[in-house]
Image (cartoon, coloured by chain):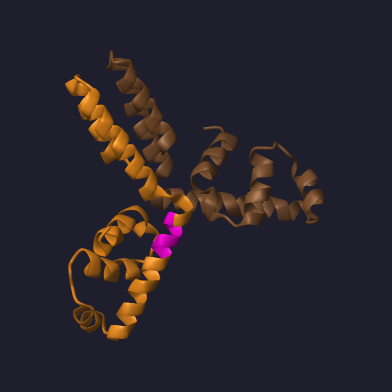
Chain colours: A orange, B brown
Amino acid sequence: MEKIVEQGLLYDFYGELLTEHQRRIYEDVVFNDMSLSEIAEEQGISRQGVHDLIKRCDRTLLGYESRLHLLEKFSRVKETVEQIEKISSEENVKLLARQILEEM
Amino acid sequence: MEKIVEQGLLYDFYGELLTEHQRRIYEDVVFNDMSLSEIAEEQGISRQGVHDLIKRCDRTLLGYESRLHLLEKFSRVKETVEQIEKISSEENVKLLARQILEEM
């Protein structure tokens, strides 16, 4: 998986477990496509500081995944939902199956 | 919800985020139905120590739920799965829907 995609997914599942400060900077890198220098200037910290913070967040988020496996579970459920969509001939059932992915 | 049931559910979702020591004692209370005195003796700590540890674990687990909402999400998905089971006339689809709850 491309790194930025994986970071985005990990953040979707575990971002709430980071501090507010970490979240703001992680979002700037992963979702707002800002450079480390831009963020450093905006936050009044060094470029290296931003770099270290991102590394630390990556480790934290991966640590949670290694214990809770939410991405892994979501990916399995997604496959099952897609199977239901594929084999069912009932439109209302397909909609409900798709809805499950929004509920997770 | 009965307290011991809620504790069991929280533990199912977030138990991996407790320490090994906390997990062992929490399991003894919640799943093995041991008394605080029995656990205190077994672990060589005071009854009050066991009591405090359980309280702390409860707070930790509830803290994770307040941020990640996994019980809440599971409960929504469960309702949707039950709707699929109710309205679908396709047996293989019902089985796949039920399977989703195991995958979470």
The residue that appears at 41% across and 61% down in the rendered structure is: A62
What's drawn in magenta, residue-wise?
Answer: A60-65
Q: Quarter of the image for the C terminus of chain B: give it.
A: top left
Estimate the x, y position of residue A3 in percent, counting from the top left: 27, 64
Estimate the x, y position of residue B23 in percent, counting from the top left: 62, 50
Q: Is residue A67 above or below residue B71?
A: below
Estimate the x, y position of residue B22 in percent, counting from the top left: 64, 54
> Is A31 included in the stretch rendered in magenta?
no
Closer to the camera in the image, A102 or B60: A102
Residue A96 visible in the snapshot: no
Extreme residue toward the bottom, this view: A46
The residue that appears at 21% across and 28% down in the rendered structure is: A86
Residue B89 visible in the snapshot: yes
Report the number of numbered marks. 0
The residue that appears at 29% across and 39% down in the rendered structure is: A78
Name the main secondary structure of what is drawn in magenta. helix
